[in-house]
Amino acid sequence: MTTSTRPRTLQGVIAHQARLRPDHQAVVCAGQAVTYAELHRDSDRTAQVLRATGVGSGSRVGYLGKESVQYWELAFACAKTGAVLVPVNWRLTAQEVDHILRDSDTEALLVDEEHLPVVAEVRAGLPTLHTVLRVDAPADDPDGLMARKAAVGDDTIDAAGDDDESPVVQIYTSGTSGLPKGVVLPHRSFFNVAEAMDAHGLDWFDWKPGDRSLCGLPGFHIGGLSYGMQAFNAGVTVVSLPAFISSDAVRVIEEERVTTAIVAPAMLELMLAEPAVGRGALSTLRKVVYGGSPIGEDLLRRALDVLDCDFLQIYGSSETGNFAVCLPPADHVVGSPLLRAAGRPYPGIEVRIEDQDGKPLPVGEVGEICVRTPARMLGYWRLPEATAQTVVDGWVRMGDAGCLDEDGYVHVRDRVNDMIIVAGENVYPAEIEDALARHPAVAGAAVVGLPHERWGESVHARVVLEPGQRAGARDLLLFLRGRLADFKIPTSYDFAEALPRNPSGKILRRAIRAELSAPATTTG
């Protein structure tokens, strides 16, 4: 299929693949498998169910559940109705889920049985949520998706138009304010980079006939969602896990003869630690894609020795539509200094480094990494000021400090926005600091990420207590449970009389990280 005839909307992709390869497996998850023809038909039915509830163009439709065939079905159904999919991180607390559903004005929500209690807790207070359907309910449950789909029959839906600028996904990402923001992505975000690679003949991120691709990152994460859509666009099979468990990932790769996979480096390390994984194991793998953090040299050495396949790093964000910079397989050489680089921009994407005044910096100088990409977001949902701060003259400010070398490779040096990445999950200090400040004994807190051998980073909190008050690490941990998702809760604490601040009063998290990461000294 040439670039000129390639579908440029999600509804166009599934319709095209259903015609081209109707009997080819599209999704395999938890023992369930559907072909492209079945995925097209079932997403038609789901789209009719949504329309029957009043969902229309621009409506927000949420999904709260673990990975499933029905998740991808809903994604295409939303595209067909002109609705916008709002995937919700199932690890979040009820309070966090409430904010996302309330902020997005979600009208219909699909949920699995495991997360019904969270929905029951928040539903009554949500003014726009009028429909809740359980995706894994039995066929005779009137509030189940299966029963509703059976009632609408097999009529083909009159799908939405082919405007690739129309919004199709709203992914929530936290920010320095501590409140999650909805990143609104149009259809084009899932096509432009692949088209540019094809036009330039690059096989960095390639697909081959018969590929079966493990999507180890969750669908509520831009990495998992974008990777899955790239696979559908290529007409290959997406293999999903309800949730990432390293033993399950190893088993599924072997049973389903998986050829490509996307994981976080921490996930890869857990897989290599599985007893069943020795040299020559997982021999069907030809390429592993990873993101969220660079791969450690020791981990790469072990992975190359055991898996003997290509490795590819991606760097991007929800705001850039995910893929922006790539470290291709040829640069994954043990001992190469390029392993510390994020990679080179994909074709059609530009990267520059800016100083604090927004002026471009020359090669080698450290400033904020900015990306100009045709796949970038439409904006933050109902936050024009935040959008204007992040996207300036078409350039997306990444919030990372870094530099460019003479060959155009991007090197990330630090995080301007202090974001922490725990096993591929983005964690934002301000959100945790705000939660800690609600404890009656806490006068202030600063949260930083510290290196962690298995998870990439761990969350650490420095806490200042109110005069005369007492609270320990266990007290704070118990206080945060139920207020924050488990992966956001600090795993370590220290207590101080004051927090380091600059002259304007801003907390210097970088100084805390440097202090805690410094080698211990001894006196004698």
Image: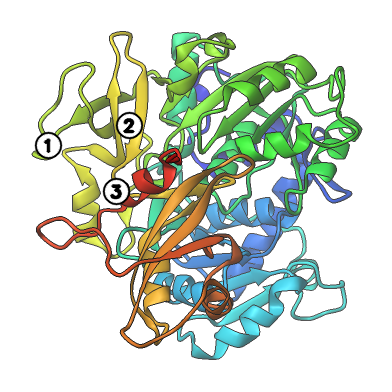
Residue 281 horizontal/vertical position (percent): 87, 23
Q: Which of disc 2 and disc 1 is earlier in sequence?
A: 1
Decide which of tag 3 and tag 1 comes sooner along the chain: 1
Q: Say which of marks 1 and 2 sits in front.
A: 1
Would you call the spot at circle 3 few (<14 residues within 10 Å), some (14-19), or many (20 or more)?
A: some
Q: Which three-letter amino acid code belongs to the residue tagged 3?
A: Ala
Q: Percent x, y for residue 113?
A: 76, 73
For this orientation, the residue located farthest to the front is 524
Q: Which amino acid does the dot numbered 1 rest on?
A: Gly
Say which of 160 and 473 sits in front. Answer: 473
- Identify the residue under disc 2: 373
Residue 166 shows in the view = no
Residue under the image location 69 percent in, 34 percent down: 268
Question: Where, by quadrant of the figure, is residue 349 drawn?
Answer: top left
Disc 1 crowd, CA 10 A, few/some/many (<14, 14-19, 20+): few
357 in relation to 498, above or below: above
Q: Residue at x 30, y 47 (%)?
A: 510
Across and down, in percent, residue 346 comes to: 41, 21
Please state which of residues 491 and 55 is positioned toward the viewer in this rendering. 491
Circle nearer the viewer, 2 or 3 = 3
Q: Secondary structure at mark 1?
A: loop
The scheme the figure's colours follow is rainbow
Is residue 328 positioned above or below 499 on the image? above
- Disc number at residue 385? none
Identify residue for label 3: 511
Query: Badge 2 local density, few (<14 within 10 Å), some, or many (20+)?
Result: many
- Left or right for 400, reference 148: left
Q: Closer to the camera, 464 or 234?
A: 464
Pinpoint residue 330: horizontal percent, then vertical percent. Answer: 55, 8
Dot 1 corresponds to which residue?
Answer: 358
